[in-house]
Image (cartoon, rainbow, N blue to C red):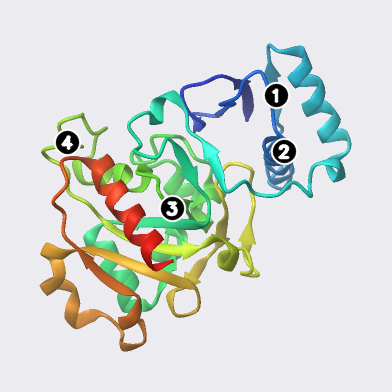
Amino acid sequence: MKVIIAKHGCTIQWDGMYYFALPNYPNISEWELKNLVLFVAYEKAYARETVIECENTSIKQLVDQALLHPESVMSAQRPKTIPGHPDCAECKQGYCHTDFLCHTASIENAKSILACGSILSAVKARNMAGAELAIEKRNAAGDPPDYFDHVMFTWGNCQAGDRLVMERLLDRSPTPDDLSSGFQPGVRFFFRYDTVIQNPDAIFDGYHPVKVKDGISLDKYLFACVIPKNLKNQFESIIPRKLNNCVYYLKNDCSDIWSWSEKNFNFALDIL
């Protein structure tokens, strides 16, 4: 994997490249250095070499020092908010809120999740090897096989999960119209960050906020499940009794994916 540190439009991994965006470029924080150290360590654990590039020599020197002395940055605390990037400009907050995490599922997948009581990794849910999943057309980003062994999360106010649900529904990259007039929200599963990181199978790969190997129990870790209200009759009968107090139905009276994310974010904050 090649890591390119710059003032990118957003932080993203795509086709073997990790575009590591610095919102305060040319400054790099200890938290960002920690994530780079974690990323290199994760890649090494899977026998993958990491090459880091940065045109700014001062940043590159700080990164090299952190990799030589990882203990110098590993105590960096998660910031309450993480500044947004230009490509996230339509996000109503303009930053990532880090108190809670979100995993968004399609309607049918959400039904399966609630029925089994856990969010399973793609390997477990689909009973396929990571190597098989990695070569599917739907793996447009080119994620490596080991990624499919984990349940992955976004930060709590992010719209990326719903965007991915739309992409899978359409079997193509969604257009602006798809994300506005044609938008169909998925089901959001919210978790407290501080709770998830206590999971013994929690893993920090320096890219996702956190991910969990194999699966995560709803009974033990779920904070809230938000279902579009128009789907209430499809879900009421399948909600496990022990999760009744965690399930909420929210009316989608929003104009687009960003407004829906904003509504979910404010709702989650109210009950956090």
Residue identifier under label 1: 52
Q: Determine if residue 126 is in view.
A: no
Amino acid type, callout 4: Asp
* Dot placed on the residue nearer the N-terminal end, 4 or 3: 3
In space, the residues marked 2 and 4 are separated at their CA atoms by 36 Å
Residue at the image position 70 percent from the left and 24 percent from the top: 52
Cα distance between the residues tagged 4 and 3: 22 Å
Q: Nearer the viewer, mark 1 or mark 4?
A: 4
Q: CA distance from mark 3 to mark 2?
A: 25 Å
Closer-to-camera residue (234/156): 156
Q: Where does the image place residue 135, in percent across and percent down from the top left?
A: 42, 40
Q: Residue at x 66, y 18 (%)?
A: 26
Q: How crowded is the residue under tag 2: few (<14 C-alpha within 10 Å), some, or many (20+)?
A: many
At label 3, which amino acid type do we have? Gly
Instruction: Give amino acid for label 1.
Output: Ile
Q: Which residue is mark 2?
A: 40
Quarter of the picture containing the C terminus is bottom left
Residue at 53 percent of width and 49 percent of height: 147
Q: Nearer the viewer, residue 215 or 185?
A: 185
Q: Position of residue 59 (x, y in %)?
A: 74, 20
- Label 2 or label 4, whichever comes before in sequence order: 2
Q: Which residue is mark 4?
A: 178
In the image, residue 215 sits, relative to residue 259, either above or below, namely: below
